Amino acid sequence: MGRKGEEIIRAMLQVLRVTDFVLFDRVDIEFGDHLNVISGETGAGKSILLGAVELLLGGETSSLMLRAGAEKALVEGLFSLGEAQLGQLKEEGVLTADSGPEIVIRREISASGRSRCFVDGALANLAMLRRLGEELIQVHGQQEHQMLVKPVRQLELLDFFGGLEPQRKTFAALLNRYRQGSRRLAELEEGLERRQREAELARFQRDEIDRAGLSLEEEKALEEEIQLLENSEKISEALSGLLEALEGEAGGLFSAEGRDVTVLSSLGGLRRVLESLSAMTGRAAPLLEQFEGARYALEEVARGLRDLQAGLEHDPGRLEQVRNRLDELFKLKKKYGSGLEEVFAFREKLEARLAEAGQDEYELAGLRAEIRELSASLAEAAANLTQARKQSAVRLGKEVSRRLSGLGMSGGRFEIEFAGTEAAGSGTEYLTSGADRITFLLSTNPGIPLMPLSEVASGGELSRIMLAVKSSLVEIESPSTMIFDEVDAGIGGKVGGMVGVYLDEIAQKNQVLVITHLASIAGFADIHLLVEKFTEDGRTTTRVRGLTKQERPAEIARMLGGDAGSETSLAHARQILQASRKGEPAR
């Protein structure tokens, strides 16, 4: 479907195929590189072709788009891409790495009105088609003309004319940094008082824990010590009884001849008995050894009891100190954790919280300094952008005014008025486009004051102003396909001729498709396509065919009105065609 192998130097629509679409049965249209004019009787279906192209750009579908009796409608377009566009779309992932400089976009519409999209045979979505459309085609119809009165669109056109888009993007990036920093600063400042209170509490809690001088070993030692101190009298009595029994003079466990003896003292007599027994029988010798071991063990017990008794003290003052200390530990554990390990862990969290608070204050100071610098940079960038825009506005105003004279607005003036945005310079009130609001002003005749375009321009005037603006941008814009619909609204033959001149100028660097009723515009066509409607077997069908050099005068004559077949009309048509080859309107 197309002319493979040809050298491709710019983006353009090479071939459009329409099948079972509204009035079209099957149409294949090949377009030229420059000015393509589409003409035909009113109602023949010229605007339907524009609708078909818009479908390839992601336009909405409807079941009414199907030709009567058809199961589905099909619209296909073969597009060529410039090298820069191809690289950009691959980088964005809209096209695959295998995509070449020619792509086929296909849209299928079912009887339910639903559609499927394909790019080079692979399923695609509407977002992809719309992104491709941004690179491939500009449609200048009534909607685009109405956009011309909107300040946002006016500013975009001015920046494009002045080559200020990089400067504008730099400003937008700077503003984005400023806004992000401002939001972060507001968040920090909003919670600053709360965080300061939290930090004070954390500092108090940390200091309280630190002042307590806690250690895990101390708690265990205190618990053992209080157990001793609280039971010191009972322990003392028990120790005294045991020592008395082991080595005292009273309360012994054995009695001989009415005299009490202690455990240890009695063991000496028992030892002598065992020694005698051992002398009488060797079998008693091991028992003597065991007895000696037991006696030594009891002596060790006695020494241990004496040491314990010597270390025992009954100190009510110390007992009170230990109780107070354990109570202090208990309160800390009740506040900060079930055990000292949890208290220590809580203290670490407090330390981290205090570090974060310090970091917040550090970040606040840094953010305030950064925002002050960004604010100054924004003001400087906005001022530079405004100055550059005002210089571009003067040049664009003169250029458009000059072109308006040839478009039926002799003596008309076009200027651009500047007004700053509200609170411009405060940073938060900047627009991403800068500090400027602009208004396109128009005076259609000498002596009439300049007024906003939205207040004075009719639909036909808007289309001519758009044409004047676009022709002023022709040396700046990247080559692409431009479609002009209703560009001839409200104008006559002479002005139409000047419109043709400007369309021809634009077409020197761009592929242009224009739908027109004016012969003076059609005369400039490099490719002239005729849309015809006819009835066959009771069905209405529309076809499109390219006119030959010999056929063109007849169509130009028809567009002039009157008797299209008369020699006078044909002579006038040839005059228009001859004049257009010189790049000037017929007189």
Image (cartoon, helix red, strand yellow):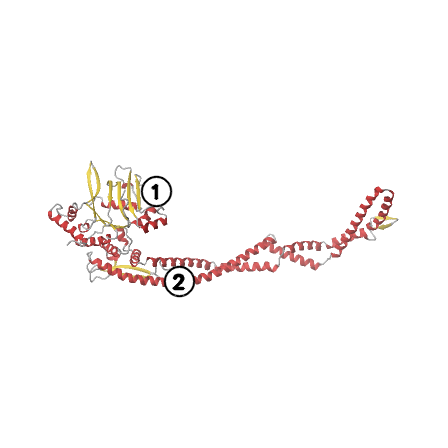
* Residue 241 x, y percent position in the rendering: 78, 52
- Residue sticking out furthest to the left: 567
Q: Which quadrant would the C terminus be assigned to in this image? A: bottom left
Q: What is the three-letter code of the residue carrying label 2?
A: Ser
- SS type, badge 2: helix
Please determine whether, in this image, residue 71 is positioned above or below residue 373.
above
Disc number for residue 122: 1
Instruction: Count residues near mark 2 (Cα–Cα under 10 Å), then give few for <14, some for 14-19, many for 20+.
Output: some
Of residue 257 and residue 359, the one placed in the foreground of this image is 359
Q: Which quadrant would the N terminus be assigned to in this image? A: top left
Q: What is the three-letter code of the residue carrying label 1?
A: Ala
**Spatial distance from mark 1 to mark 2, Cα to Cα?**
48 Å
Nearer the observer, disc 1 or disc 2? 1
- Residue sticking out furthest to the top: 537
Q: Quick check: 210 left or right of 47?
A: right
**Is residue 414 in view from this perspective?**
no
* Count of marks, rendered view: 2
- Circle nearer the N terminus (1, 2): 1
Of residue 472 and residue 582, the one placed in the foreground of this image is 582
Instruction: Count residues near mark 1 (Cα–Cα under 10 Å), then give few for <14, some for 14-19, many for 20+.
Output: few
- Asked if labels 2 and 1 touch by Cβ distance under 8 angstroms, the answer is no
Q: Quick check: 255 left or right of 545?
A: right
The residue at which mark 2 appears reads as: 375
* Residue 454 x, y percent position in the rendering: 26, 56
Disc number for residue 425: none
- SS type, badge 1: strand
* Residue 106 x, y percent position in the rendering: 30, 43
